[in-house]
Image: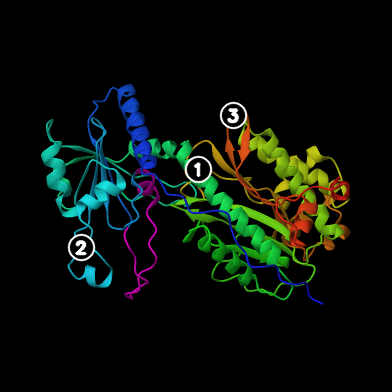
Amino acid sequence: MAAAAPPPSSSSLAPPEVPMELHAGNRDRLVAALRAHLSASGRPLRGLVLLQGGEEQTRYCTDHLELFRQESYFAYLFGVREPGFYGAIDIVSGQSILFSPRLPADYAVWMGEIKPLSYFKDRYKVDMVFYVDEIAQVLHDRFSDHGKPLLFELYGKNTDSGNYSKPASFEGMEKFDSDLSTLHPILTECRVIKSDMELALIQYANDVSSEAHIEVMRRARPGMKEYQLESIFLHHVYMYGGCRHCSYTCICATGENSSVLHYGHAAAPNDRTLNDGDMALMDMGGEYHCYGSDITCSYPINGKFNSNQTIVYNAVLKAHNAVIANMRPGVNWLDMHKLAEQIILESLRNERILHGDITDMMTQRLGAVFMPHGLGHLLGIDTHDPGGYPEVITVEPGCYFIDALLIPARDDSVSSKYFNWEEIEKYKSFGGVRIESDVYVTSHGCKNLTNCPRETWEIEAVMAGAPWPVRATNNSLSKAS
């Protein structure tokens, strides 16, 4: 007889009001950083930061408007949710200016009220608001005391995508001098260090996403489709959390699909049927006011870990916990990646899946056979936030059985000797395990912002209907040890 479905979900959370002082503070930090850079470079303190916000896009050649999400750098500095805006900041005075698109009269018929400029000034807490078609005149008239005004424009490479940010473009740009190299690295580094108000939004996104992950965990049953688990998550973060956007495309992978690192895309659309005995790898995160979360939970669909699932899961959990315990300012992130690899390899050797010297395995990079991705990434307004050193970062070790990596290892005369191929065969359709939490690096260590069941006994208890957090019993503690 199938287990009864859990009661309808609910939440104690409520979408918070976002103070626009958050973005005013971000602008202040950028101005201070630019002034310091110009002074150190012996350059005069003059010029304006100019950014172009995101534009609404239609679906290919149709008139269907895709749901707009603001360009991330513009969101960071201004918090504007509408498309078609520009923003400027005077480096000398710190004054901020928004430029709104001048909307046609029929906008009021199809899209709603045409807001006056005063609305945007009050809502976004800027000093001045004009129309986009007034950019050249306004900036030239107000900031040409020392000749052509200088515009610091955003142009630089995103190291994750390889794409370049788009510098602002408007009619009359020939009246201005442009600097395309100074702003991007400075603004990118500003985004690394989060303010308390930014951390509160990232924490909220983690809270509602953790809650949604638990709801998926409770409702998962053999016979369901992967996309039904995705639907439960999306419903919860939007219904109870006000998260209209997710940080990225949901990865709802079960069985052998859980070894596909970025499963869930259009060609692999979370459409497999869940089977009794499958492991599930759920990588999903809600986004609120452009600030995101990135959380992965792995668990058995039937609610009970078998021996092989326990072995792999606990190997990854041990690596996850060790990295978090060792994270603090001054620790090298590459060393943390090596620590995670070493712990996973040691765990697999203890279970006779591997044999040989761990140091030799590390030298041969066998860790990358089981964990072919990085240990984590920066997190903020983008899932893969830009910047050169971590403050808010994901910790996401994993262990996967991927034929595309195991077959070359078997064919390699040096690597092959470390594998117990008879044992490896038992995991051929296992898939993989990933455990991902979002952590904030503090002066003393780090704080885990994610709140999901992690120990095997916690997961089994929650999937059986226990409330979260689970109160440990003597029996559960003995199972965990």
**Overall secondary structure of the magenta stretch?**
loop
The disc labelled 1 sits on which kind of residue? Ala
Give me the residue at 67% from left, 67% from top.
7
Q: Which residue, given by chain and number where applicable, does mark 1 sit on?
A: 200
Residues marked 1 and 2 touching at CB (< 8 Å): no
Crowd around label 1: few <14 · some 14–19 · many ≥20 (10 Å): some
Write the start and end of the magenta stretch as one range. 55-77
Q: Tell me how far mark 3 sits from mark 2, CA to CA.
A: 49 Å
Quadrant for the C terminus in the image:
top right
Residue 104 percent coordinates (x, y): 18, 66
- Pick whichever of labels 3 and 1 is earlier in the sequence: 1
Give me the residue at 26% from left, 25% from top.
43
Left or right, residue 143 beside residue 441: left
Give me the residue at 87% from left, 54% from top.
420
Q: Tell me how far mark 3 sits from mark 1, CA to CA.
A: 21 Å
| Residue 286, magenta (yes or no) | no
Residue 457 percent coordinates (x, y): 80, 53
Residue nearer the viewer, 143 or 450: 450
**Quick check: can you spot residue 262?**
yes
The disc labelled 2 sits on which kind of residue? Leu
Q: Is residue 424 above or below residue 397?
A: below
Q: Which residue, given by chain and number where applicable, does mark 2 sit on?
A: 103
Q: Which residue, given by chain and number where applicable, does mark 3 sit on?
A: 329
The disc labelled 3 sits on which kind of residue? Pro
